[in-house]
Amino acid sequence: MLLSIIIPCYNEEDTIKDLLKELFSIEFPIDNEIIIVDDGSDVNHKILIRDEISSGKVKFIRLPQNQGKGIAIRIGLKYASGNIFIIQDADFEYFPADIPILLEPILNKETEVVYGTRFATSPKGMSKFHYLANMLLTKLTNFIYKSDITDMETGYKLFTRKVLEKISLKAREFEFEPEITAKIIMCGFKIKEIPIRYHYRKFGRAKINWLDGFEGLLVLIQQRFCLDSKIYQFIYEIYKFHIKKIIYRLTKFISKYLHLRA
């Protein structure tokens, strides 16, 4: 058995070395491989982790430009050789020492999918906005898909190759989370949740915002009710590639203007 740890990475120069150090220190119950996909970061992370790559402990792929978390994960999965996969965010908000615990239900053949839930306890440092957005999207997922999970947006999603062979991922950015969850449920796989530790990032800024949350809702609706609807797909693409960008730039401009006036 081989565990593939996929790390999508964009401008995480403050955490990437410490994250790898932590991963190297863990005694996993099975062999593992680490695959980092640098999603067109401003600083080439290959320079920062040169020693780790040359040692053979890390596979490294650098994309020529920033394309989005979903694409980075999909590329990482293509390079992965494992029987089991987990996504490890490079911002170090999740504790890698929890991964062996997440592996247990799969190794014991209890399930094919494990999610690490942050909401068994109160997540440390998470803003009220992010907390409420996570709760809302999770409740909507449960309502739409008749599921019973507590953390749809969790970064710790563990699944087997059997699951990967049953679903086709198309996400480009943060819609990866609702897309893979929807497809896992629609394929009849049971998601087992295990409590994990979590602390809000200490360096850099969160890259997800409320516009991504609204897009997540659109994806949940699309996957359940409008999968083959060309009209819905057209509306979704108009939002994703045009309206979302316009609103984002407008809110940045307003924020900057208000800051200058203050």
Image (tube, helix red, strand yellow):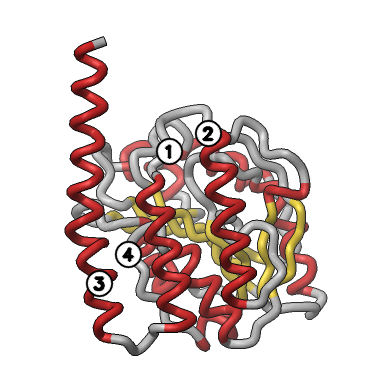
Badge 4 marks a residue whose secondary structure is loop
Q: Residue 201 carries which label?
A: 2
Badge 3 marks a residue whose secondary structure is helix
Residue 186 against residue 170 in the figure, above or below: below
Kind of residue at disc 3: Ile
Q: Distance between the residues labelled 4 and 3?
A: 17 Å
Kind of residue at disc 1: Ala
Query: Is residue 115 found left or right of 261 in the rendered image?
Result: right
Residue at point 79% right, 66% down?
104
Residue at point 69% right, 65% down?
149
Badge 1 marks a residue whose secondary structure is loop
Q: Distance between the residues labelled 4 and 2?
A: 23 Å
Q: Residue beneath label 1, please? A: 206
Q: Residue beneath label 4, please? A: 172
Q: Which of marks 4 and 2 is nearer the N terminus?
A: 4
- Category of crowding for the residue at label 2, using alpha-carbon neighbours closer than 10 angstroms: few (below 14), some (14–19), many (at least 20): some
Q: Residue beneath label 3, please? A: 235
Query: Is residue 217 found left or right of 242 in the rendered image?
Result: right
